[in-house]
Amino acid sequence: MIELGNVAFGYSSASLAVDGVSLVVGPGERVVLLGRNGSGKSTLGRLMNGSLVPRAGSVSVDGQRRELARLVGYVRQDPRNQIVSAVVSDEVAFGPRNLGLSREEVLRRTEDALSTCGIAHLGDRMTSELSGGQQQLLAIAGVVAMRPRYLVLDEVGSQLDDAARLRVSGIVRALVGQGVGVVDVAHSVESLFGADRVAVLASGRLVWQGAPEDFLRSDRALGLSGLASDPLARALAVAVAAGYRLPAEPDPEGLASYASAPSRVSRGEGSRTGTHELSCAHVGTSYDDVRALDDVSLAARGLTLVLGRSGSGKTTLGGVLAGVLEPDEGGAALDGRPVRVGDVGLALQRPEDQLFCDTVLDDIAYGPRQRGLGEDAALEAAREAASLLGVGEDLLERSPFELSGGQMRRVALAGVVACGRGALVLDEPTAGLDAESRQELREVARGLVERGAAVVVITHDAGEWLGDATSVALLREGRLVAVADPARAASDPVLYETAGLAAPFSVRLCAALGEVGDA
Amino acid sequence: MRRSRALGSFVPGDTLAHRLDARVKVLCLLVASVASFATGSPAGLAVVAAGLAAALAASGTSPLRVLLALRPALLVLGFSLLANTVVLVGQPGVSTSGFLRTSLAIARIVLVVGFALVFSATTMPPAIADALASLLGPLSRLGVPVGGISTMASIALRFIPLTAEEVLRIRSAQRARGARPDEGGALRRVASWGQVLVPLVVLLFRRADELGRAMEDRCYTGEQTSLAGPLAARDWLMLALTAAWTALAVLL
């Protein structure tokens, strides 16, 4: 078993990222590690596989204290940062080749791991051609091929859509069944299904530990993990209080007989449709022989969700709406006038990767300056956007590169908000943030909508935005297959299936509740 | 997002040329390039050309792609042909011997480009890296870190498409904020590349850092099991055929 005894670690001498943590993880056990961004979850994971050496305390794995990486596999959040090779099978072989195994053994393990993860058919493909979900399965296969006794999964599901996430959790369940001990660093409530134990970190300390049901019963534990306001967590807490026991995988039907309807049913309807309208008509565009968008017409007021599998054309549509991509046919319009570059704010995935100015204020003011506003007006617009996004006055003169990840995300989004006054396109704005930061960001989006802006949110995580949506658009292979109002989107799983998606848990629950109510 | 394959990149397939061992292909490419320049007579060149035709056929590569690959050099080649053919100094006129001499030189270049194209279209990048590592193997006794070099080559190949994708993303994000990278004078354009380079470099360093950690997590030390297996009968046959063909071309 993995034994942490009073472990402490700090990246700088002044502060501790992990402070006096003692934790035991046994074989065949799945422990979910919860906590806010920056609470030390990833650091703890890296201490377990020996890639970080504790400043104090001890780490041992099955009695061993050295070469822990051979025993404990580690999979990260962003698969693109851990793929070494250009070819799938070669990527999976990378780990086993480092272990000093014979060629035959390496090839055997590679094949086994590929089929365990259900991607044997992709063996000869180029890694860069895979979808995000496939890349994450590949990253897991690369670690599984090393036959570790334990696995640390560092938010592996956070960039995946529901269907890919279900596949990953199926694979993890099978591994746990084979006796692999798993530490699942997570921030979603769904990770509790099938967990043996929950551990909560806050400011580097282990503040709560126990069974998943007890976690849901404890207001203190929920609060410390940052999940207290999560609607699904609340629904589960109510059900558990009524005697519900969490099964190995999410079962909305079973839960429905214990739960009442989720408390947040769409606040997006009615009055909160904004004054601005971002629209596109008969948009079609192709990359070489692949049709990326085909006759897409959409009128977005208020908050519009765009959903679809990876490769369905979501991001391309975002680019067209923002005017940075010239479609082959059709075009985008803001309040009836054709969109020019700069009219519509566009935040691509991980916008914090795109900061480049010397100070935060300069970066936010870049857009307004480019628009030709005077210096005073540009700075005024920048300050206004900064306060809207909750970027403090004290940060404005600092370099964006010395901020934390969450702060950088806000600065980058403020830069986008400062440009597009009437309309915004946000591509995966909450990816990688913890529950509370995501909620704050949704509030910002809500605020913008209330001021009349048309906000288009492209996301793989439909469940989290449904409560705020004015309408939901679903893309499949470049075609718009459905536009639904929020009431239907919150309760009709079939809608998601038409787009090749798995319905979010809350939607399946809502549908199951409807059936219970009808009976 | 799918883009057309860059010229000279791997084309998936299951032809004879795809199935040959990468080490054999590296050796054959080397020998064929030497043969293209070592042969003295037009007859020898014809033999080499026949070899290229066979290689193109065995790999399912269109001869048109060879011409496409030559496009960047077309101007220089055309000009050198012209310059060697037309004599302006002394007694102006047309020099047949100059024309012949240059034609032969150009033919040699076309042949080498053709061979290289067949090789790169039928060999996966990691296999090239492995083959080089395996052929350079003896150098490791002299202290050359052959394994490290091959991993480095493999990672570089992996990062090229990633970097191109990031540049595209950063540019479109900046365009959405009103940047006009293609307008203005030369100075402004250079400055606008600076705006792209700052986030790009920060990002690539962060990526490299994380990739390094991920490699460490997967126990990378520099020593790796070689995936190169024993050569099949067809590989030996190919080597023998290439040797005979080269001898014929050079001796003719």
Image (cartoon, coloured by chain):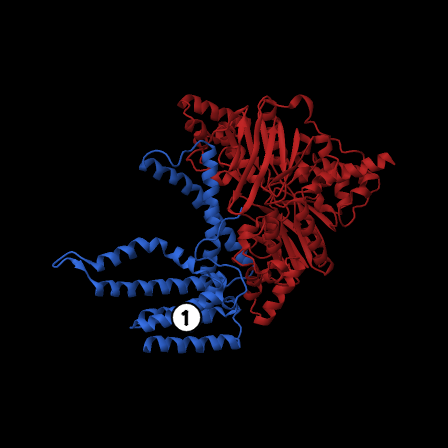
Q: Nearer the viewer, residue A92 or A456?
A: A456
Find disc 1 in the rendering and name its residue. B51
Q: Position of residue A304 (x, y in %)?
A: 62, 31
Residue B230: image location, x then y, percent: 53, 75
Q: Which residue is drawn at 38% across and 62% down?
A: B113
Viewer-side residue, A35 vs B228: B228
Q: In this view, does A332 lie above or below B63?
A: above
Up/down of A261 relative to A193, above or below = above
Total numbered circles: 1
The x and y percentages for residue A193 are 74, 47
Q: What residue type is labelled 1?
A: Gly
Spot occupied by residue A160 in the image (x, y as percentages of width and height): 63, 46
In the image shown, does A474 or A83 lie closer to the viewer? A474
Q: Is residue B100 above or below residue A445?
A: below
Q: Label 1 lies in what chain?
A: B
Please tell me whether residue A369 is drawn above or below residue B88 in the rendered image: above
- Give the red chain's letter: A
Tell which of A484 and A281 is nearer to you: A281
With A153 as the anchor, is B143 left or right in this view? Answer: left
Badge 1: how crowded within 10 Å, few (<14), some, or many (20+)? some
Q: Looking at the figure, which quarter contains the C terminus of chain B?
A: bottom left
Residue depicted at 40% across the width and 70% down the height: B50
- Residue A168 seen in this snapshot: yes
The chain assigned the colour blue in the figure is B
Taking the image as shown, residue B76 lies to the left or right of residue A420, namely left
- Left or right: residue B32 versus residue A26 is left
Which residue ends up furthest to the right in the rendered image? A519
Q: What element carries label 1?
A: helix
